[in-house]
Amino acid sequence: MTPDFTNTNLADIIELKDISTSYDKGQSYIIKDFNLLIEDIPDKGEFIVILGKSGCGKTTILKYIAGLKEPTSGQVLIRGRERDRSVPISVIFQEPSALEHYTVLKNVMLPLLYKGVPEREAADRAMTMIKAVGLDGHEHKYAKFGKLSGGQVQRVVIARSLIANPGIILMDEPNRGLDNETALQIDLLIADLWQKLQSTVILVTHNIDQAIFLGSDIYIMGGKPARIVQHFKVPIGFPRTRETKRSREFLDLGGQIEEYLYQL
Ligand SMILES: Nc1ncnc2c1ncn2[C@@H]1O[C@H](COP(=O)(O)OP(=O)(O)OP(=O)(O)O)[C@@H](O)[C@H]1O
Ligand SMILES: [Mg+2]
């Protein structure tokens, strides 16, 4: 069964202008002159990937977009306005962060309950989403390790993040620490749900294969201090499948990006 995403959002525009990050009052910078404009494509979301080496500042940038942290200088504009929390933004963090003392079902219902959806309807919609992420039969378990595997906990987080259909979804290496097959299954799940949602997604990762597999556009974050240094369009259509990873386009772009990162 497909979750009901008919109540969709408008497409969003995100603009990061001259963002900088310094932890020593401007003596040195981790991020500087970071500029990124994500344009609005009517009736279609974009899957934007920011690809960069570990420690370059990817999580920091996501926190700025989510409004969880303020840059040293620069502006974050969402739909042309400074962040004012009126645009729902959902974040999937690096470390799975389900609410351990709630069941899977309650975790997934919560965003709807916050929005005022009646309990019964919220439970029904949450069950549809739980089935969509492959957790049917686990809904009454507590959402924690020991009761669920790492991949399953991350599925709970994904279901909870997407159920309220946020206009913007931020993802921070959502399959870090999972084995290859589980990681690929999570990527396939994300690709599939995104196609139905048509939201704007920004994913940050250091993994070239994941970037190409999921993304419509890849921006390379690099340099010292870090900024966006290159843009690659992914010349591969949707939906993405297991076969995508073996296609000529996939392998060619992987080679190009690897070469680019090497000489960076
Ligand atoms: N409070 C702080 N004081 C000084 N440096 C900090 C502080 N917080 C973060 N940093 C530095 O900022 C840089 C960027 O951190 P960030 O977590 O954004 O990187 P990342 O690209 O997400 O890394 P990873 O790929 O490992 O997740 C790192 O080099 C980190 O050491
Ligand atoms: Mg990080």
Image (cartoon, grey):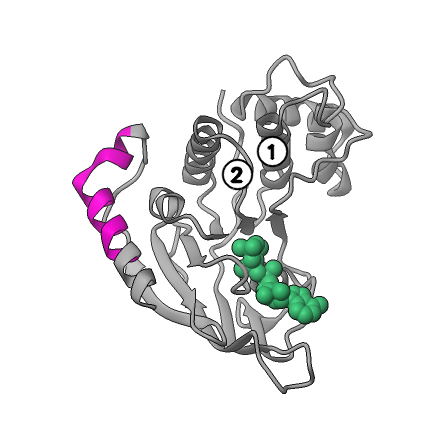
Q: Amino acid at mark 1?
A: Gln
Q: Quadrant of the C terminus?
A: bottom left
Seen in the picture, residue 142 relative to 74 is either above or below; the reply is above
Quadrant position of residue 55: bottom right
Q: Is residue 159 left or right of residue 206?
A: right
- The residue located at (60%, 26%) in the rendering is 152
Write down the residue under mark 2: 175
Q: In the image, residue 28 lies at what x, y percent?
A: 59, 82
**Residue 154: numbered disc:** 1
Q: Is residue 64 magenta?
A: no
- The residue located at (32%, 64%) in the rendering is 231
- Residue 64 visible from this viewpoint: no
Name the secondary structure under disc 1: helix
**Of the pair 12 and 260, the residue shown nearer to us:** 260
Q: Main secondary structure of the magenta part?
A: helix
Query: Closer to the camera: disc 1 or disc 2?
Result: 2
Q: Is residue 114 left or right of residue 80?
A: right
Q: Amino acid at mark 2?
A: Asn
Q: In the image, residue 113 lies at what x, y percent?
A: 76, 36
- Along the polypeptide, which appears first: circle 1 or circle 2? 1
Q: CA distance from mark 1 to mark 2?
A: 8 Å
**Of the pair 133 and 114, the residue shown nearer to us:** 133
Task: Count the labels in the image.
Answer: 2
Give the magenta range: 243-257
